[in-house]
Amino acid sequence: MTAGGLAGLGPWILLDRNLKRVVLGIGVLGNAINLGVLTAGQAEEEPGSGGRREPPS
């Protein structure tokens, strides 16, 4: 949800003519992409395992 909010906010800030807001928009959009990648990488994790996987038997 946070990644989606940042992904929507980033381009909106980018469309401003003020240079500070354009730079801020690039930063926000970059954080949204990083959060999306991290969230997608954790999708296959078993709940409650703490990120550890047992070797296959």
Image (cartoon, rainbow, N blue to C red):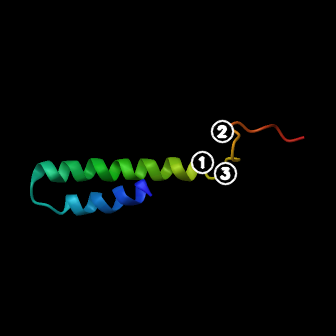
Label 1 sits on what residue type? Gln
Q: Is mark 3 on a helix, strand or loop?
A: loop
Q: What element carries label 1?
A: loop
Query: Picture coordinates of residue 55 (x, y %)?
Result: 82, 37
The reply, left or right, for residue 43 in relation to residue 36 is: right
Q: Which of marks 2 and 3 is nearer the N terminus?
A: 3
Label 3 sits on what residue type? Glu
Query: Picture coordinates of residue 12 (x, y %)?
Result: 23, 63
The reply, left or right, for residue 14 in relation to residue 39 is: left
Q: Residues within 10 Å of mark 3 (few under 14, many from 20)?
A: few
Residue pictured at 67% horizontal, 47% vertical: 45
Q: Mark 2 points at which residue?
A: 51
Asked whether the residues under the numbered discs 2 and 1 touch, taking CB atoms below 8 Å apart as contact, a structural biologist would say yes
Q: Distance between the residues labelled 1 and 3?
A: 6 Å
Query: Picture coordinates of residue 57 (x, y %)?
Result: 90, 40
Q: Mark 1 points at which residue?
A: 42
Q: How far apart are marks 2 and 3 (CA)?
A: 10 Å
The reply, left or right, for residue 35 in relation to residue 53 is: left
Q: Residues within 10 Å of mark 2 (few under 14, many from 20)?
A: few
Query: Picture coordinates of residue 16 (x, y %)?
Result: 14, 61
Label 2 sits on what residue type? Gly
Q: Mark 3 points at which residue?
A: 44
What is the quadrant of the N terminus in the image?
Answer: bottom left
Residue pictured at 41% horizontal, 54% vertical: 2
Q: Which of marks 2 and 1 is nearer the N terminus?
A: 1
Residue pictured at 55% horizontal, 53% vertical: 40
Asked whether the residues under the numbered discs 2 and 3 touch, taking CB atoms below 8 Å apart as contact, a structural biologist would say no
Asked whether the residues under the numbered discs 1 and 3 touch, taking CB atoms below 8 Å apart as contact, a structural biologist would say yes
